Amino acid sequence: MSSPAKRIALLTSGGDCAGLNAVIRAVVIHATNLDWEVFGIEDGTHGLIERPVCARKLTLWDVDTFMLRQGGTILGTTNKGNPFAYPMPDGSTQDISDKIIEGLHSIGCEAVIGIGGDGSLAILRKLAQQGGFTLIGIPKTIDNDLGMTETSIGFDTAVSVATEALDRLQPTAASHDRIMILEVMGRDAGHIALATGIAGGADVILIPEVSYSLEKIADHIKAIRKRGRNFALIVVSEAVKTAEGENLMVSFENGETRFGGIGHYIGAKIAALCKAETRVTVLGHVQRGGQPSAQDRLLASAFGVHAVELIREGKVDRMVAWSNREVIDVPIAEAIAHYQQIDPQSALVKTARGLGICLGD
Ligand code: F6P
């Protein structure tokens, strides 16, 4: 049997989102058509710690069109276990980066396509520099906070899911004269909340990039009620702080923390100030699962094909990106460095204000 022209590794890393399988499919189809071999690494870099490494050759048989429609990632992923400070059973941390690089070399891969957000791409980049392998990044994150790309895989689906939630909350809010609060995800950036609030006709959108006053929100809702509308919709991003400036978090048994609680906080405060009934929906991981939207499937397909092309052209240390109706590529370092929160002067913030939506300020 003739040896392949190239052998590349593919992995998904960080929190999952809709559209990851569509990227895997695009990479495998394009690379296979070039007579390359693609090895899918399981559970991000974790698969490279195991011996033998947890990796399998992906063929056209593995990536039928069902992959376009399927949420999650067939490779598995993790947002834990930084290999440069890997948690050991005794509570200490250890640098196991050499083991991961050795694992990659053991399957003869000369390049890695890493699908991840800013944290994962930063780790993969450090590994690539240390191990001397080619790395091409593909941006994915429902938070849409990676720099140098207009959008990332998973964002559009998350916004569609959250918008559908508002569509469902509105009639029940109207039936019961209630104020509905929808808490959406977004670690430190309010892109999901802003896009959802506009698309779903919210009256109030709270994002971490714009500080708010509870009284201003209450006045806005009172004015709506005075005009004769009996309900209101509020979208709040999980990373919004309390009026006192505190981040509300939930803690897990393993000591990790995540945002959680701001929806209920806003609900209680607004109920008291407006003397109205409030109900809170925390959307959570529903935003990450399920079928990817058509937009995410397109983005995933375009990104996957372009990533393979970059390896063919001998490019290194690049991330594929979306800009001005085109797939382009940018230095991974710049994408990581330019963390993208919402610019308070951006078009969507102006749109929200132009529609009379209260941002709390
Ligand atoms: O970064 C993606 C994200 O979904 C954030 O929006 C959210 O805060 C976080 O991950 C949740 O992480 P986990 O899946 O570990 O609960």
Image (spheres, rainbow, N blue to C red):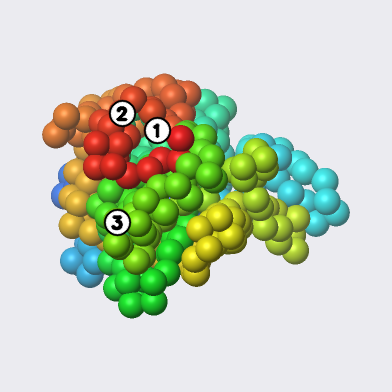
**Amino acid type, callout 2:** Ser
Residue 346 image label: 2
In this rendering, the answer to whether 132 lies above or below 171 is: above
Residue 342 image label: 1
Point out the image quarter for the N terminus.
Answer: bottom left
Residue 227 image label: 3
> Does label 3 or label 1 sit earlier along the sequence?
3
Residue at disc 2, secondary structure: loop
Q: Residue furthest front?
A: 226
Q: Which residue is drawn at 41% across and 53% down?
A: 221
Mark 2 neighbour density, 10 Å: few (under 14) some (14–19) many (20 or more) = few
Q: Which residue is drawn at 22% across and 46% down?
A: 299
**Real-space Cα separation, disc 3 to disc 1, in angstroms:** 31 Å
Mark 3 neighbour density, 10 Å: few (under 14) some (14–19) many (20 or more) = few
Q: Do the residues labelled 1 and 2 touch (CB within 8 Å)?
A: yes
Residue at disc 1, secondary structure: loop
**Amino acid type, callout 1:** Ile
Residue 57 image label: none
Nearer to me, 3 or 89: 89
